Image: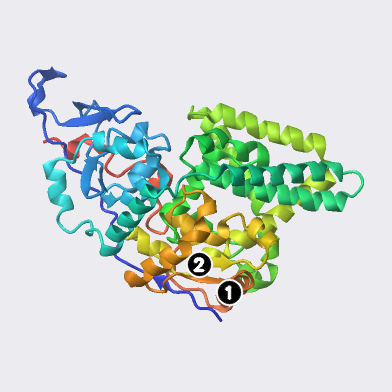
Amino acid sequence: SHVRKITTTRSNLNMVATSPTPGVNTGTVNGENKSQVPMGWECDDEANCVEIPACDDQICRTSLDVRIHGEWYDLSGWRKAHPAGQHWIDWYDGRDATEVMDAFHSEKARTMWQRLPKSKPDALEVLSADVVPDDTPTQLAFRKLRAELEADGWWERDYVREATLLSIWFGLVAASVATVSVAPPLSTFLLALVMTNAGWLGHDYVHGVDKFTDFMRNFVCIGAGLGTTWWSDKHNKHHALTNEQGVDEDVATDPFLYTWAPDPKHDSPLRKIQHWIFPVPFSALFALWRYDTMVVAIEAVEQKRPGAKTELGLLLAHYFLLLTLFPFGVWVPAVFLSGLMSALIVTPTHQSEELFEDYQPDWVTAQFESTRNAKTTNPFSEWLWGGMQYQLEHHLFPSMPRSKYPLLEPILTKFAQENNIKGGYRVSGEFEIQKMNWELYKGVAEADAVEGAPYSRGHGQLGAINLGFSPAANFPAANLIE
């Protein structure tokens, strides 16, 4: 059977909790000389930052240091203004975020970070003491490759292809509506294709950073009943921290399906038969995503996150159309059939590869080692997979139009060879990769539980990204001021 290796490295979770260097301006703050008061930063949503007192009556903000393209920046004042949420900033406190910054952000955002304040000397002294590994030759080579691809126009969108994909989707919608009375089973099948395809189109649009994808960003809300806020929070974490146990929710499918032998206290009797019953939890995937979407959308409105009301309105419009056009006996089975199709596509490209117990500072190598592509055999499969068959290309360049992905294979194959990446460019046939996934489930089902095995939800790493605060962001004042 196919054997998957779990890789462990030293974790770099210790954040830099140092008092900001005192300001040199004269004046008083709360009756104290300003030159004796620790100073921090406050930034607006354009990354324009001003120095402010680091302390109030209760807490002092310490530095929140992130390395981008070899320079350390203090993002303590930017974290609250970050459009995608504070948790992303927190997670990279004391870490390098270059590849994540380049992969997920628009051209405008990728120039804004240069306006942020540089880290203070006392923070740099701590960070330089082997807390954070230097950039590897593979990381530096990848940054060069990315710059070359950008200069050569690889992010230019093919609008004829985009129109073709949307036309196929609208055609399926029309066909599912036309057959709902005369052939309900056919309508269910077509509606399942509508939902699955809407998910892949929405996936492209949410990842995109150009004007077209900005305009289409909420398509997935009305087309598939899935929320952009939920998708961004969950899916981008998967991209940034792929196959990291306890962090990546895409490999946290227990107690119904286990991707590694768990600790006895987290075990379930279902594990022993998971390779026989996996289609059942697979089918529930879309229903679970829909439920999570509504929970997050409502919370986003309550938290007054940008665009949250529009998103919730489009989700409600989706359900209005769904319930108006399709009877219960058609749309409910379609949700579960769509879940089965989607799960068969999204699960095998990562689960059978390396899993990591700790944070991986070399993001590029981690993507190669944790990802396997699928080689499709016919035009229908090529369309049905929705670009997910090019999983490595998508993980390395998530904002690139998927039409460019097939052309990247020889480039990435050569890159892996030149940089001696273990396993190289990994690809298997679309049926072989399903077999590998089944063998993984079978192997884990037959394995004994392991004392001390990582827990899928919170194994030593989940802290800042799920709790929503940085260990360095809110530090007791007594620890900073004598």
* Quadrant position of residue 53: top left
Disc 1 packing (10 Å; few <14; some 14–19; many ≥20): many
Q: In the drawing, what numbered circle is on residue 436?
A: 1
Cβ–Cβ under 8 Å for marks 2 and 1? yes
Query: Gap in Å between the C-alphas at discs 2 and 1?
Result: 11 Å
Task: Find residue 151 and report its horizontal and vertical position in percent.
Answer: 36, 48
Task: Find residue 2 and report its horizontal and vertical position in percent.
Answer: 53, 78
**Disc 2 secondary structure class:** loop
- Could you tell me which residue is drawn at 32 percent across and 67 percent down? 9
Choose mark 2 or mark 1, whichever is in front. Answer: 2
Disc 2 packing (10 Å; few <14; some 14–19; many ≥20): many
Nearer-the-camera pick, 37 or 425: 425
- Could you tell me which residue is drawn at 32 percent across and 61 percent down? 362
Task: Find residue 481 and report its horizontal and vertical position in percent.
Answer: 14, 35
Q: Is residue 341 above or below residue 440?
A: above
Per the image, the residue denoted by label 2 is 372
Q: Is residue 146 left or right of residue 12?
A: right
- Could you tell me which residue is drawn at 16 percent across and 45 percent down? 123
* Quadrant position of residue 267: bottom right
Q: Is residue 96 above or below residue 364?
A: above
Q: Quadrant of the N terminus?
A: bottom right
Task: Find residue 256 and report its horizontal and vertical position in percent.
Answer: 62, 62
Q: Is residue 74 above or below residue 339?
A: above
